[in-house]
Image (cartoon, rainbow, N blue to C red):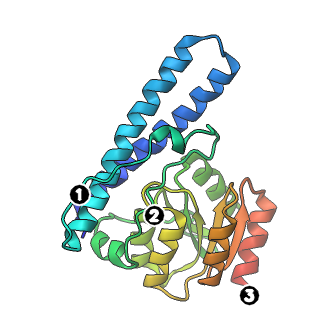
Amino acid sequence: MFDHDDLKWLATNATELNRLLQSVSRTADQVRQHQADAQYLELLDEQVEQASRTSQALFNRITGRILASSGEGATEVALAPAWQAVAASTPAARSNVSVRIPAGEVTRNLAGELGEIEIRNPQGTRELILLVDDDLELLDTTGAMLEFEDYRLVLAKDGFEALEIYRRMKDKIALVILDYFLPVMDGDAVFDELKAIDPNIRVVLSSGFGEQAKLGSMLARGLRGFIPKPYSHEKLVDQIRLVLDA
């Protein structure tokens, strides 16, 4: 369905869309603070337009591949205006294209995409943890917490990278800490793909936003725990031990 070039293109453009939406959120804050300043409104309009074009391109490529593979042919599907997706202009304005790909399909197409996998704190005496988050600052901060506790860890900045890492290291990884809001594939989809690789995988979901309906469904499908953002060092460690010691 999706070849390597498709996946690279999707990841690159979804990351750009995520960046644009974050810019929209920041500019919207400026608009609220400087209501009489037209420059912020013009900038906001330009950013929304760029995000809309990128979102449409993503949607068309994904649906085109899915429809083509099912024999229905690629057709143009209208996408809701981008301003609807970011109307609240909150930090939750993140991009997630909600096209469900059958579990296992992504992993089959990703084989061999990743180079050598770096293990942080390789001499650590505690379990190996895969930490998945597109916030690079949070990855570094949380990674430092885990290193302090003498865990070994592997970092992934998106779902595709996480799936390839787990496919290659599933016998060594004791726990996955998975962000819900990720480019292209949200945490729910990544969780299903991980379960397709290993039905007994231990995954803890991490999110700063209320996804109660999704959380309940994921728990029913084998999710081991949830840790809300922002989390403290103590809460992070407690949740890890609660799952690993169960």
Across and down, in percent, residue 111 comes to 29, 73
**Residue under the image location 50 percent in, 37 percent down:** 83
Q: Earlier in the sequence, mark 3 or mark 2?
A: 2
Please state which amino acid type lies under the numbered disc 2. Answer: Gly
In the rendered image of this protein, does residue 116 appear above or below residue 25?
below
Compared across the picture, whether 10 is left or right of 217 comes to left
Across and down, in percent, residue 90 comes to 64, 40
User: Quick one: SS at disc 3?
Assistant: loop
Q: Which label belongs to residue 159?
A: 2
In the rendered image of this protein, does residue 196 appear above or below residue 166?
below
Q: Which label belongs to residue 121?
A: none
Please state which amino acid type lies under the numbered disc 3. Answer: Ala
Report, in whole angstroms, how far the alpha carbon at label 1 lies from the one at label 3: 49 Å
Compared across the picture, whether 6 is left or right of 152 comes to left
Q: Depth-wise, is mark 1 or mark 2 nearer the camera? A: 1
**Residue under the image location 70 percent in, 75 percent down:** 225
Please identify the quarter of the rendering in which residue 61 is found: bottom left
Q: Which residue is mark 3?
A: 246
Report, in whole angstroms, how far the alpha carbon at label 3 lies from the one at label 2: 26 Å
User: Quick one: SS at disc 1?
Assistant: loop
**Residue under the image location 58 percent in, 61 percent down:** 180
Q: Earlier in the sequence, mark 1 or mark 3?
A: 1
Please state which amino acid type lies under the numbered disc 1. Answer: Thr
